Image (tube, rainbow, N blue to C red):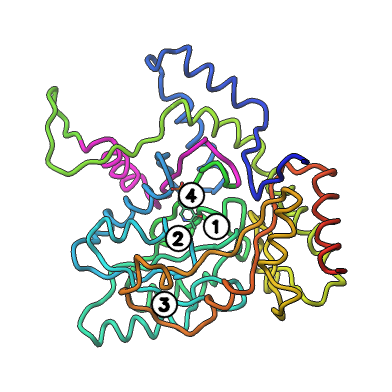
Amino acid sequence: MNDKIYLSSPHMGGTEQGYVTEALSSNWISSSDLNLNKFEYGLETYLGAGNYITALSSGTAAIHLSLIMLGVGQDDEVLCQSMTFSASANPIVYQGATPVFIDSEPDTWNLCPVHLESAIKDRISKGKKPKAIVAVHLYGMPCKVDEITAISKKYDIPLIEDSAEALGSSYKGKKCGTFGHFSILSFNGNKIITTSGGGALVCRDQKNKEHALFLATQARDEAPHYQHSHIGYNYRMSNVCAGIGRGQMEVLDKHVALRQEMHAFYKEIFLNISEVSVFEAPNNDYISNHWLSCIRFNIVNNKFNPDGLREALLAENIESRPLWKPMHLQPIFKNSPYYGNTTCETLFNTGLCLPSGSNLTETDRQRIATTITKYFNS
Ligand SMILES: *Cc1c(COP(=O)(O)O)cnc(C)c1O
């Protein structure tokens, strides 16, 4: 059997180990936050002025902290893109609040501004104004940022930008991770860069960053003993993990370019396969890092369908995966309100994510191309 080709696996640049070793040999003491400081500074420089990073244990923790900092609490409602990874929605429930799910639009597969606005109007008319909006850039494709930001401003509802999949993407020349009241990033093993596990909260000022750091490190008041006036969290990234991140920052641009090349590779393969469309940006305002390359079946029948292609790839030890199953169709969220039609449901039923790692070799690509071509010529 050939080696397994993964959807998206960690890709080290080479310098990570040195930074980790440095952290280990300093025995976690003396200037022990060096990697953390360098990693955060690297991200701030990358995102540009006005962005303040707190490195955390996960992207999920970053969403949780942003909800806490926006004052989301018991019985509040938070609007959330339905088609996403469950980590976008779970922290809403950690706060005792209710997620209100919104359909996607077909251009970017992300939060539909039209359904978002009708949901806001309806929730307000029912007596409760939502406390926040969670918008996602799925697979690295920026959402309709201008339209969503305008709604956030019009109704004065803060926006949380879930940029877990979109580091290296941009919208109208501005980087993803810089929009809304808070943004979050993820450095999980399958993301565009990794710290083995980790994430970051992006604040828009130093004061919020300091508050995030305070909450993420058990909310200790200033005193020689342990004194607490707030509930704290153990959400800080370790300096060892940050060493991996520090090295990964050095190859971020290169790895984004390689993911984008994978997308070009799929466009080439599917050029003459009319059953399938490769997911791409609606226009030049949207630059995707193409974290994952995705396709959609234009027609699904007994001969050609996403599951059939997935199994054909699996038989060659090549991983592929259905698109994110919408949250409003998940058993755990079946009682949550939903606004929209069937756009995200149809995407889920007709789409597939293909191997997209920046570390795939020419041999890997050949195997993928051969398997796909064979499936459609059968
Ligand atoms: C990965 C991911 C997260 C969560 O990040 P973790 O670091 O795994 O906690 C949140 N939202 C989306 C859309 C993601 O893909």
Estimate the x, y position of residue 374 in percent, counting from the top left.
Answer: 86, 62
Which stretch appears magenta? 192-219
Sequence-first tag of 4 and 3: 3
- Residue visible at 53% across and 22% down? 20
Secondary structure under the numbered disc 2 in the rendered image: strand
Q: Earlier in the sequence, mark 3 or mark 2?
A: 3
Kindly identify the amino acid type of the residue bearing the numbered disc 1. Cys
In reply to whether residue 200 is colored magenta, the answer given is yes
Residue 195 in the image: state x and y as whole percent: 52, 36
The residue carrying mark 3 is: 151
Of the residues shown, which amino acid type is indicated by label 4?
Leu
Q: Report the residue marked by disc 4.
A: 185
How many angstroms separate mark 1 from mark 2 (CA)? 8 Å
Q: Which mark is residue 176?
A: 1
Q: Is residue 226 left or right of residue 108?
A: left
Distance from the alpha carbon under mark 3 to that under mark 2: 14 Å
